[in-house]
Image (spheres, rainbow, N blue to C red):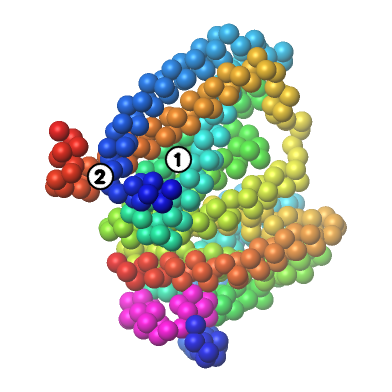
Amino acid sequence: MRPDSLGFCRQLFVRHLRCGVRRVEEVFNSLVFFLMVVTLFPLGIGPDSNTLRELSPGIFWVVALLSALSVSGRLFSADFEDGSLEQLAVSGHPLGLCAMAEVLAHWVLSGLTLVVAAPVFALMLNMVPAAIPTLMLSLVLGTLCLSLLGGIGAALTVGVRRGALLLSLVMIPLTVPVLIFGTSAVGEAAIGYDPSRWIALMGAFAAMGLLLAPLAIGAGLRISLEQ
Amino acid sequence: MWKIIHKFGSPPWFFRFATKAVQWLLPLMLIALAVGCVWGLLYAPPDFRQGNSYRIIFIHVPAAVVALAGYYVMAFAGLVSLVWKIKMADVAMRAVAPVGAALTFVALVTGAIWGKPTWGAWWVWDARITSMLILLFLYVGVVALFEAYENPEVAAKACAVLSLVGTVNIPIIYKSVDWWYSLHQPASIKFTGESAIDASMLYPLLVNIGAFYLLFAVVVMMNMRATLLETHTNAAWLREAVD
């Protein structure tokens, strides 16, 4: 840790954000992927609006989880391939913190765009309108949790060939609490209950993730650089 | 104290120790397993409500207990390997993962076999079953990550990090699955009489739990010996030990 590490990480964050905004088609692609998978569900289970309404929180969260994991597979691969990750590792700044700049920039781009687009998808799935604010709030925290977990998985699998499927295999069991908190919050809001306890639990999970994920990501990246 | 720990870190010492330990523990385990199974399956009284079908708990519960403990053994070995860089801890971690996965699988299969006559279905999305299934996924993830790396040393470190992340997460997963289940309470399916188990059933169960711990220890040590045989093929101490 150097005295200017935090400033350096802030610069990294802004740089990643700027790079992400310039490659806006990637964000767009992930939204289209989301839309397509959402479309598959009515095609698979039938167009009955009551069934869809009942299943919509679960469908929404499962798709969010899968799309978050599928995009986090590429999180560090560009930096790994062109050697800038090694530069960061020897820079004297804590590697975990530098990687967090990238994870958080990724979250802002992919997670928060999903939050903004969520009402449209929710209405397509015939979700109860009253549950939509809860859905958006839980998605803000939930996509952060998923980005952090995806970051850990990406750090551990970045050096492995065909790491994308492996990342999902390794991380899906760890994302179970996020799925349960998210679907429970939205499901309870849909029937008129107060979902705040689930939101609070998700917030606690996100807070713990923010604290511990830098350690795991830093360790994982160093291991991946070693081989 | 430190001397003993250092000894465990040395492959030649451990190889000889494991050879000796397996020689002693293997018969002990077979005896305990035989006693527990015969006692539990033949002599323990049938259950008031479930009749004889409950007897599968003498396999099911020990497998589940040791499977869960195995994850923590693996994570502890991972911690030792990351902090003190002891190679034998890597070997231990690699040896535990498939054994733990197999025991979890046994617990799931025996649970399904028990569920058919008791609940009328092979698979019920009960909180405990679901948690065990997720535990199986966690083990499979560790094994898959290990297999994906070409260099076993790097693989062991990556698996150590993963199993530590899993250790932090396991209590949260268990609690959240519990809440998920109580939220969607279907019908009145409950585990009967496990908290208030009679002594005549408890003692054979405890014997079998002990036997499964021994089984776990024996298989893990045999696994570790196999890894050492593989990685130190040309070492002089190994030739001596094998001859």
Same-chain check, marks 1 and 2 = yes
Residue A174 spot, x, y in % from top left: 55, 55
Q: Secondary structure at mark 2?
A: helix
- The answer to whether residue A203 is seen in the rendering is yes
Q: Is residue A32 above or below residue A10?
A: above
| Lower sequence index among marks 1 and 2 | 2
Look at the image and say whether residue A100 sits in the magenta stretch: yes
Q: Amino acid at mark 2?
A: Pro
Magenta stretch in the rendered image? A78-101
Q: Residue at 31% across / 42% down in the picture?
A: B14
Q: Which residue is mark 1?
A: B101
- The answer to whether residue A122 is seen in the rendering is no
Q: Is residue A154 above or below residue A42?
A: below
Q: Nearer the viewer, mark 1 or mark 2?
A: 2
Residue B160 spot, x, y in % from top left: 43, 56
Q: Nearer the viewer, residue B176 or B240?
A: B240
Residue A107 occupies quadrant = bottom right
Whether residue A43 sits left or right of residue A54 in the image: it is left
Q: Which residue is mark 2?
A: B12
Q: Disc 1: which chain?
A: B
Q: Amino acid at mark 1?
A: Ala
Q: Secondary structure at mark 1?
A: helix
Main SS, magenta region, reads helix
Q: Is residue A15 above or below residue B173?
A: below
Q: Disc 2: which chain?
A: B
Residue B107 spot, x, y in % from top left: 53, 32
Residue A156 spot, x, y in % from top left: 42, 64
Q: CA distance from mark 1 to mark 2?
A: 28 Å
